[in-house]
Image (spheres, rainbow, N blue to C red):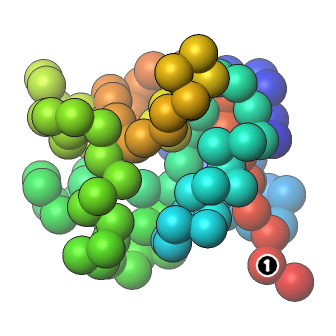
Amino acid sequence: MFHTPLTFTKAAETCYRNGGTLAMPRDALANLLLSGAHRYNYWIGLHDQRREGFFEWIDGTPLGAFMITLWGSGQPDDRNHENCVQFVHNPDRAEYFWNDLHCFRMLPFMCQVIP
């Protein structure tokens, strides 16, 4: 977990320089683990920068149908060209979900390294 807020692109570059990628929670268990990791919102490795409405992981693989259930209510909404995804954690309501957000916003981020 990197606590210094960066843009999506800078966060992805930082993960790469450290031998990994932005976190890619591809299943319910990974999302559950991320929900307990920190008490604030952060970038994950999901975006639709190449083609609007077609979300893909930072490694280029498609989102997949199962993951549609992990979006927050009304998300993704692409309000004013939101193309990157944050993991939202609301501990007061014991909920977590994904939200699309402007890629230039500054957020903490989580990297993953696969041995």
Disc 1 marks which residue?
Answer: 114
Using the rendered image of the protein, determine whether residue 77 is visible from the camera's viewpoint.
yes
Which quadrant holds the N terminus?
top right
Question: Is 31 left or right of 71, judged from the image as shown?
Answer: right
Q: Position of residue 11 (x, y in %)?
A: 63, 41
Question: Is 107 left or right of 68, judged from the image as shown?
Answer: right
In this orientation, which residue lies closer to the viewer: 57 or 41? 41
Using the rendered image of the protein, determine whether residue 24 is visible from the camera's viewpoint.
no
To which quarter of the image does residue 113 belong? bottom right
Q: Position of residue 62 (x, y in %)?
A: 31, 77
| Secondary structure of residue under mark 1 | loop
Q: Position of residue 44 (x, y in %)?
A: 54, 48
> Which residue occupies 59% across, 16% down?
92
Question: Is 112 left or right of 69, judged from the image as shown?
Answer: right
> Which residue occupies 39% across, 42% down?
98
Please tell me how crowded label 1 is: few (under 14), some (14-19), or many (20+) other residues with Cα within 10 Å: few
Residue type highlighted by circle 1: Ile
> Which residue occupies 51% across, 72% down?
27
To which quarter of the image does residue 19 belong? bottom right
To which quarter of the image does residue 43 belong? top right
In this orientation, which residue lies closer to the viewer: 87 or 52? 87
Which quadrant holds the C terminus?
bottom right
Decide: is 99 above or below 18. Answer: above
In the displayed orientation, state which residue is furthest to the front: 93
Decide: is 34 above or below 1. Answer: below
Question: Is 3 left or right of 33, judged from the image as shown?
Answer: right
> Which residue occupies 79% across, 78% down?
114
